[in-house]
Amino acid sequence: MAVTMNPTPAGVAVTPAPSKAVLSTNYITDFDFLNQYLPDLYEKEFERYGNRSIASFLRLVGAEVPSNSDLIKWSEQGRLHVIVKAATRSGETIAATKHSFRVNQTVIISDGVTTAKALITGTTTDDITVAAYGGSTLTAAGLTGTSGLTVYVYGSEFKKGTNGMSGSLEANSDIFENSPIIIKDKYEVAGSDMAQIGWIEVTTENGATGYLWYLKSEHETRLRFEDYLETSMVEGELAADGSAAKTAGYKGTEGLFSAIESRGNIATGSIAGKTDVESIVKVLDKQGAIQENVMFVNRAKSFEIDNMLAGLNTYGTAGAASFGLFDNDKDMALELGFSGFNIGYDFYKSDWKYLNDATTRGAIEDIDGVIVPAGTTTIYDQVLGKNAKRPFLHVRYRKSEAEDRKYKTWTLGSAGGASTSDLDAMQVHFLSERALCVMGANNFVLLK
């Protein structure tokens, strides 16, 4: 079944988008009051798009923390064990550029098919020399490959009466940073227009109602700005060196999608069966192994997951899964959706309106969702100079004792109660300065 959305239903001259001016496309003009017959009027504006706000994601999974700097820096723990991939070998010498192996460590060497174990007998900056345990050479010990090798340490061995380990390893950490951006918006209405009362009763998502059209427009500007506070953190991108934005003096900020694409995991394709989820679980095993994860997905991906889980119930077949209680009757509503499941880890599923909305990512449909770890992580805050517990995903906004830029709004002009200038209008300004911190992006999965 194909469903086609009609953006302009017949008989209604309303374009579902904001406009800077009062045009025939954004006001209803189908009522002719020069006609001698008075039409039946529906005074209340019909809310055909429901709640149009898309801000919800960061409110559910994140927190907001003040910051007083133009730069936010933090360090995350590195891997505990030593490993090198894509190494090559010539005989018993293995090329591993800028490795951190040490003499007398024992290693496993694999080409993906065959494996050998050996003891490191010598090292240089970019090479290690080994002595195989299983034969006179690595080849005799069973290792056939010479390229694309994976080498990792599993222990060490020393002879009696010898000195200890030579050299030491420093704790490895990765330092990340992000910069806040300034987000602004403004609404302006002339004083004369504020005194004009319309015949349509308007309403907005925050509950404001009345016959003054400027109230609706001001509230919609506010709601739109609040949506941008979230979407800027989700979609933000750092200005690359040499880019037009950087040349023009803009720095950008690293948003959620950008952080996952550069430091996280990307899953492509559909979730058609249990094995597709198992592939994601295997990746999480190799990362932080966070037990609880939340899947924020669009409607199509949500249906995929529901169908996958429902397909596990084969109605009495041995080994099949069964869902719900066994007290169904013909008058009971049938629940076809799933809110969560466990396959190695706990996964909770939630629809993300931003990915469904026809005026945002729902119009592009290139991202199906994200898997976000739940809980907090401990990081070293470079600005505070100490360890701090933070949610994996949180917003840092600019604040000091004299200035709070989390969400600023102020009114200028000489109308609507303002008396700051001789401008015969009311201007409502909005401003925020913030950045998103994605801690442990290696635990996130972007679904495409």
Image (cartoon, helix red, strand yellow):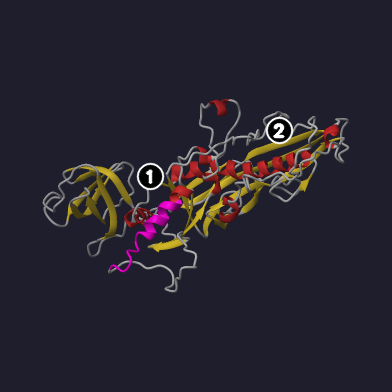
Q: Position of residue 239 (x, y in %)?
A: 54, 33
In reply to whether residue 210 is colored magenta, the answer given is no
Q: Residue at x 76, y 31 (%)?
A: 32
Q: Identify the magenta region.
A: 302-317
| 133 shown above or below 264 | below
In the rendered image, the quadrant that contains the N terminus is top left
Q: CA distance from mark 1 to mark 2?
A: 48 Å
Q: Is residue 235 left or right of residue 223?
A: left
Q: Residue at x 24, y 49 (%)?
A: 122
Where, quadrant-wise, is the C terminus in this rendering? Answer: top left
On screen, residue 99 versus residue 76, left or right, reads left
Q: Amino acid at mark 1?
A: Thr
Residue with the mark numbered 2: 30
Give the image location of residue 121, x and y in percent.
Answer: 22, 51
Residue pictured at 87% horizontal, 41% vertical: 417
Residue type indicated by callout 2: Asp
From the top left corner, tell me how far across and down residue 116 is, in percent: 18, 54
**Of residues 3 and 381, which is closer to you in this image?**
3
Q: Report if residue 182 is visible in the image.
A: yes
**Residue at the spot of label 1:** 268
Left or right of residue 149: residue 305: right
Residue 310 forms part of the magenta stretch: yes
